[in-house]
Image: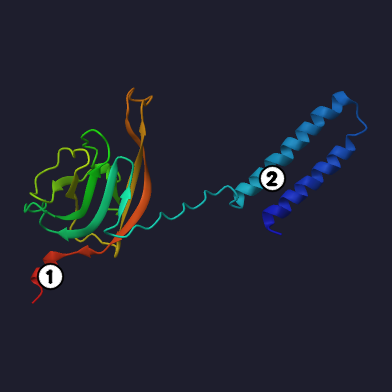
Amino acid sequence: MTESAGFRVHCEAILKLRLTSVRGLDGIEQRPSTWIVGGIVLSLALLATALSGGFAAAKPKPLPALEAGKGVDTGQWHLVVHGATLSATRPDGRPAPKGQASLAIEAELTNRTRESSSDIASALRVNLPAIAPKTLPLLLLARDRSIVGALHPKMAERLYLVWDVPVGTAMPDPLPVVVMSKIHKTRDNLVGGSGWFDPKPLAEVRLRVATPDTAERAP
């Protein structure tokens, strides 16, 4: 028997003894006494449970694993994550800001809705301390390296989602990338209209991060 369980059993025994002692009282006196003792015992039991970790939050379940190159429907998108690159140069050829390196996630997105959408940046989340959760990536089309405005219905586009991280950032191997999902609401109470809401993690892709700068410096 655990320490907290033994404490609760002891509290219940006290309650039984106290209830027995008040049986001879009339209904007016017995009822308040019973409730007071019961409340005290309940409070003590809850305290014991809390101190023993009984109310500790459960660990979240691991996300389903998704292989690189495999597609998944996220609600408004069909998404395929292909790879990751860390370089001093962005995919469009521009250098990363001073003291920064560009982490580019290459992915293919297909708009599954009937309207063009610019809600692209929230499709992926990189689990890296150097990237704040709400930091939006730079979006570049793979075919011409131009900045992405919106993706049109039923048209697959390969693109880069680019985050800047400090040079020397420890990079996990493999790098966990979370695929996010949303649900469609015909009317949302907060915005008063329809759209895609409630982003939630759907799956996790683990990517080996390519470092072309290191390869270029090698003899």
Label 2 Cα neighbours within 10 Å, binned few <14 / some 14-19 / many ≥20: many
Residue highlighted by disc 1? 215
Q: Tell me the tag on residue 168.
A: none
Q: Which of 113 and 81 is in front in this view?
A: 113
> Can residue 135 be seen from the camera position used here?
no
Label 1 Cα neighbours within 10 Å, binned few <14 / some 14-19 / many ≥20: few
Amino acid type at mark 1: Ala
Q: In which quarter of the image is the N terminus?
A: bottom right
Picture layout, residue 98 above or below residue 16:
below
Q: Distance between the residues labelled 1 and 2?
A: 62 Å
Amino acid type at mark 2: Ala
Residue highlighted by disc 2? 45
Residue found at x 76% / y 37%? 38
Counting every numbered tag in the picture gives 2
**Based on the displayed image, in which of its 4 quarters is residue 208 positioned?**
bottom left
Name which of mark 1 and mark 2 comes first in the sequence.
2
